[in-house]
Amino acid sequence: MRRWLWPLITVAWCLGGRLGARTSRDAPTVTVRDQGKISGKEVTVTRAQRSTLYLGIPFAHSPTGDKRFAPPVTDPPVSWTGVKNGSLFGPSCMQDREELHRHDRLKLADKLFADTDLEITEDCLYLNIYLPDGNPPSEGWPVMIWFHSGNFSVGAASLWDASVFAVKQKVIVVTSSYRLNVFGFFTTLDGFAPGNFGMLDQVAAIDWVIDKIDLFGGSKEDIVLGGHSAGAESVALHMLSPLSNKKFTRAIAMSGSALTQGVIRNPQKDNYLKEIAEKFNCKLKPTVELLNCLREIPEKDLLKETTNLANWGPIIDAPFVNDSSASFLPGDPLELLMSDKYNKVDFMTGFTDMERALTFAEMTDKDFNRQLFESQIMEEMSADTIFEITSNSTVQCTLNYDLLFNSVIFFYGPPLLNEDASELKKKYLEFSTEKYYAAGSFLHATYVSKSKAAFLYRFDYKLKTELNDLIKLEDWMNVPHMLELPFIWGMPYWTSFASPITWNNADRKLTDIVMSLWGNFSKFSNPADRGRNVQWDPFTPETQRVLLIDKNIEMSNPSTFNYKATKFWNDYYPKLAEASYTCCNTTADSKIIRPSGTCLIVVSLPVIINSYRYGSEMSFMLWT
């Protein structure tokens, strides 16, 4: 090629938005019912395959002004005149850029938006559609709706290029934004602002897809919800929400579940209402005046002053909504599963083998020793456990924390005193992965598998490609949080990076297999890839088989997977916690039986589990 052509090609690539391909052309215009006409663009995925993209489609009105701290407004739909340009992303929701940078381990914002900053604003309720090439089948293409990660505080739908997955798996992919942090999860603990607005945004996006996706060749009867981390937790919560009932047929939750420790927030515990009112010189009561005041605060000021004010995220909102039918989450996730009150859909879930490796490496010394190992576990458990609880003015309950801590150390501690730092780090990461990821995935899959198909995986394959400008893994690390996503989304085939990456052939080969597994589940509810001789046995309460994804992909057995770990957290530890509480009456006229100076109590198992999972207040039934 003549050298003088390269500058022209580079300019054309930049103007094309650097998404999915170095070349793009206009896509057919689509008339969106009740909204207007939208144009898109076609991008090259392979020499013979192109994906059609329609970006930045509004699915709800701008949540600004009096729509701040309120459910998304979708009636009437957002409409426009003329032809809307669907070749550009809509803005991402309000968030702290520095926090986004820390979360964006793969530096996708830098690589995909190298020439301009990612646009961030409160007007952000947009979705993006990635279409396969060719004509859709008569019943329409299956549809995946993807919710991004970011601990419900940061993240952007625009960071995930779904064109490769859409083309290679013949699945429409919709990536959607949703309000984050204070904008998505503020609550006044009453009907004026019951919270969970970010989750209601997701429901609105699902409703838009059901109503409009046929215009793009998709099937509203064949929808899978997918997500990673906070996105996975979102998917799992939709499986429990009456507002999402019968709106999807399958669910994929990667590295997160509704039972993950800390997913459900406790706004009463944070007690931020008084502080936020004082910060902005607003009246605390009546609630309507507080809301009117906060709706006048500039978006950047509101974000800055509230980012660290509370642990923003989903709550059990049933006590706060005026109409019970409007509640997104009517009860505790575990109790909903135990009482069979959940949306029964086919389910795929799993985790990587070293979920917290990168975070752990950033905060620990290289000379990690046994003392540091035990202190790190103690710090983790201290954050989860209530040491002393008073249920009323006369009864005090104390937790035998040493018993719990020693049990965990006995289970995870190294057998030898002279274990080297790398082995100790691996053991700590086994603890954190199994406690915060594996246990919840197992428990959720166990309930689902009683009535629907469930599939569970552990991702053990470590990238062979050197991604030094993106991320560097230490020798002792295997697969940290988020490092399975390059395979799911076909990143070795992306041409959207500003600086192309030379991918290892082994990584490319595994990418093809992994995309096929996820694609097969999205289309057929059976992820097995018989063409590549990859069998994936269902997870059942009796068998509890796990697909181990590594250089060799195989089903687990007791010699390759530690089944005792999930049983420890889901079965033994809650019982141990229950037995570790002692409650004594402080009055002389008590009716409580106190053999050997100890008050006997009866505490329901879900309450104990809630205590160490959510850090919530506990209620006790005294045995009198």
Image: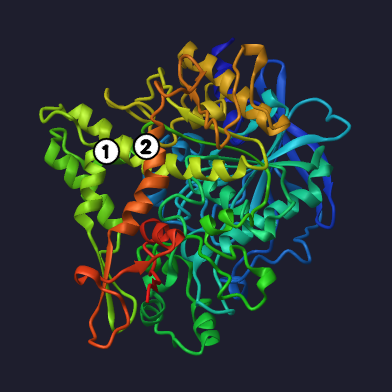
Place of residue 161 in the rendered image (x, y in percent of width and height, measured from the top left): 58, 34
**Residue 474 against residue 444 in the figure, above or below:** above
Question: Do we see residue 49 in this rendering?
Answer: yes
| Count of labels in the image | 2
133 relative position to 276: left or right: right
* Residue identified by numbered label 2: 565
Quadrant where the C terminus is found in the figure: bottom left
Place of residue 506 in the rendered image (x, y in percent of width and height, measured from the top left): 48, 12
Amino acid identity at mark 1: Phe
- Callout 2 touching callout 1 (CB < 8 Å): yes
Q: CA distance from mark 2 to mark 1?
A: 9 Å
Amino acid identity at mark 2: Ala
Tell me if mark 2 has few (under 14), some (14-19) or many (20+) residues whose alpha carbon lies within 10 angstroms of its own: some
Corner quadrant of residue 267: bottom left
Quadrant where the N terminus is found in the figure: top right
Place of residue 169 in the rendered image (x, y in percent of width and height, measured from the top left): 69, 26
* Residue identified by numbered label 1: 411
In this view of the protein, which residue sits in the foreground, 344 or 587? 587
In this view of the protein, which residue sits in the foreground, 448 or 366? 448
25 relative position to 328: left or right: right
